[in-house]
Each structure stands twice: as C-alpha cells, then as structure tokens.
C-alpha cells in the first residue's frame, strides 16, 4: 500500500432523487471518482457538502471521511484549490 493525496476528479455521476432509506437525504449524488495518482484508480462514492446541481464531470474533488460505527467511509467533496 502507498498513501495517496485524496484528490481526484469526477468521471461520471448520477443524481438520485429517491430516498431509499430515511438516512439518505434526497437528492444525493452517486459518482465515480478517479484519484489523481493513478489512472484507473476509482471509487464509487457520494459527493457531499455540495449542491447536487453543482456537480459536474471533471470537477476536482477531495476526500472526506464519515464514521459509521467502527468504519470510516471515504466520501468526496468539491476541492477548494
């Protein structure tokens, strides 16, 4: 394993407007993010802390982690720089 920066770009995404469970606020974005360190190194994830309508293909993002019990889940938000 090699540490990575946590920076990447949105390759593709969809906006889900159906809240399948109560904890999923709608709308929410499901995206494939490719990390900048390696072509093909991709995450299926959510884009958070950003209006769904502002997400775009190619948008730079950075990782944030959400703790769910004893697991930290990698999510991504719009990069600030």
Image (cartoon, rainbow, N blue to C red):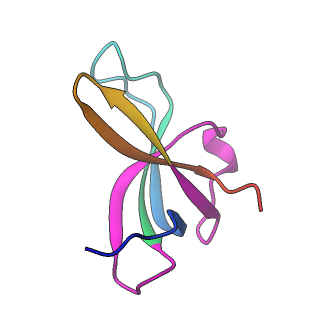
Residue farthest to the front, as pictured: 2
Does 13 sit left or right of 78 as displayed? left
Q: Residue at x 22, y 27 (%)?
A: 70
Nearer-the-camera pick, 13 or 2 = 2
Q: Residue 36, how many percent across, how many down?
A: 51, 78
Compared to 64, does 5 lie above or below? Answer: below
Nearer-the-camera pick, 22 or 17 = 22
Nearer-the-camera pick, 73 or 20 = 73
Residue farthest to the right, as pictured: 81
Compared to 11, does 75 lie above or below? Answer: above
Q: Residue at x 69, y 48 (%)?
A: 54
**Quadrant in the picture for the C terminus:** bottom right
Q: What stretch is highlighted in magenta?
A: 35-63
Tell me, yes or no, whether the highlighted magenta stretch contains residue 26.
no
**Quadrant in the picture for the N terminus:** bottom left
Q: Residue at x 51, y 31 (%)?
A: 27
User: Across the whole image, how many numbered discs are drawn on residues?
Assistant: 0
């Amino acid at each position: 394993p090699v540490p990575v920066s946590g920076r990447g770009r949105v390759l593709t995404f969809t906006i889900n407007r159906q809240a399948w469970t109560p904890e999923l606020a709608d709308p929410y974005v499901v995206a494939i993010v490719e990390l900048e360190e390696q072509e093909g190194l991709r995450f299926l994830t959510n884009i958070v802390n950003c209006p769904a309508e502002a997400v775009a293909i190619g948008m730079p993002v950075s990782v944030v982690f959400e703790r769910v019990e004893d697991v930290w889940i990698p999510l991504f938000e719009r990069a600030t720089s």
